[in-house]
Image: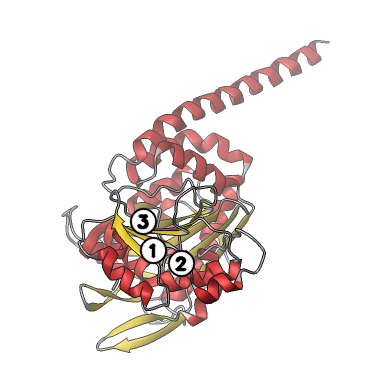
Amino acid sequence: MKRKIGFKKFFLTVFTILLGIVIISIICFYEAVGKLNNNSKLSSNDTSNKSSINILALGVDIGTVGSNNKNDPKRTDTMILIHYDKKSKKTNAISIPRDTLVKIKGRNSKINAAHATGGVQGSIDAVQKLLDIDIDYYGKINYEGFREVVDAIGGVDVKIENNMNYDDDMQNLHIHFKKGEEVHLDGKKAEEFFRWRKNNDGSGLPTGDLGRIDNQHIFISKVTEKMKSPFILFRIPSLLRTLPKYIETNMSSNEILKYGYALATSENISTETLKGSTKYIGKGSYFIYNKNQNKEILNKLRDIYSFDNHDNSNGFKDKNFKIQILNGTKKQGLASGYKKYIESKGYKNISTGNTKKTNQSKIIIRKNISIKCLGNIKDDFHIFTVENSIKDSSEFDITVILGKDQEYKK
């Protein structure tokens, strides 16, 4: 009898401790998420009517090696676009090579320089222009924060697939791993694994940065596994103390709760890398993004909106829609210039006007159309955020709202 009572008492004690951890974690979580976006000066898009969201995850480097200036311009060492489909609950994490060729202020540049010259907004603009999509949210962390977050979750175990031997005294970076060994990566070791791409003797990954991205995907999958483990419960207080110190984001507390939980519990997460080729231009080596090779990825980013399954081919063929174009920016003449562009595509019944300022351009559809027709409208208008407002009593079949993201486009 005493043993039974003792066991029950032990079980009750353990249960009470676990319950206490859960309650404290929840309280800490709500306090922590409220602090996460305090440092962000960028607003976010209204995603309430969108079937999916895009989050740009940025990892920034240390800046100028040897400098103690915290305000040194920092490039992005890692850039990942996270696409979450609200309906299917699917998540696609798409890595963008840091050497990707883009135009910054009219000059050939690598996309990792966009942050150094224009901050977070510079990186967002570069990705939006490259992929013709809208970025709804962003999250940014530096390597100090990366180390602390990995330590907060207790590190991860990874099998090393390459001999890694690299020393850089200027950065105090010393990477030494043996091929085939199982290694527990704490924050410091995780940074070394995450950053490595070649050895001091010149050997290393034959695909350079693209191979490094493959290693990063392995690490991300291990972190995802760790976050889904029941043992992560005991790490939550430490994690919540760490996150607000190092994460910068424009997501609200509610959005962090909603999408953070959705991503953490998603059973369908895939990782990919933009496809293209490397090429020397002048003295620099660039990754050349190939749009045709990335059609499958782009299709995932540009969701198909199913309004009606019937074939409304006449509506598409005649382009006989009543269209309203509204300028949601400070740039004068944007709507009239866009009207000429749409008219060149064969659309005729078009009116222009102004509306309240907005960052994100979108198309509002008020007419039953086929999926094929909608796809052609999105391609013609070159805007891929679409809302279904068939019940709206407006006189216009289509309203196009031009946001700040259209200012840099021709």
Image quarter in which the N terminus is found: top right
Q: Disc 1 marks which amino acid? A: Thr
The residue drawn where x is 45% and y is 78% is: 204
CB within 8 Å, label 1 to label 2: yes
**Residue 160 visible, this orientation:** no
Q: Which mark is residue 78?
A: 1
The location of residue 114, given as percent across then percent down, is 27, 66
Q: Is residue 375 left or right of residue 126?
A: right
Q: Who comes first in sequence, dot 2 or dot 3?
A: 2
Residue corresponding to mark 3: 360
For the residues labelled 2 and 3, the Cα–Cα distance comes to 23 Å
CB within 8 Å, label 3 to label 1: no
- 409 or 255: nearer the eye? 409
Q: Above or below — where is 214 with respect to 93?
A: below
- 18 or 107: nearer the eye? 107
Q: Disc 3 marks which amino acid? A: Gln
Mark 1 or 2, closer to the camera: 2
Mark 2 or 3, closer to the camera: 3
Q: Which mark is residue 238?
A: none
Asked which secondary structure carries label 3, the reply is: loop
Asked which secondary structure carries label 2, the reply is: strand
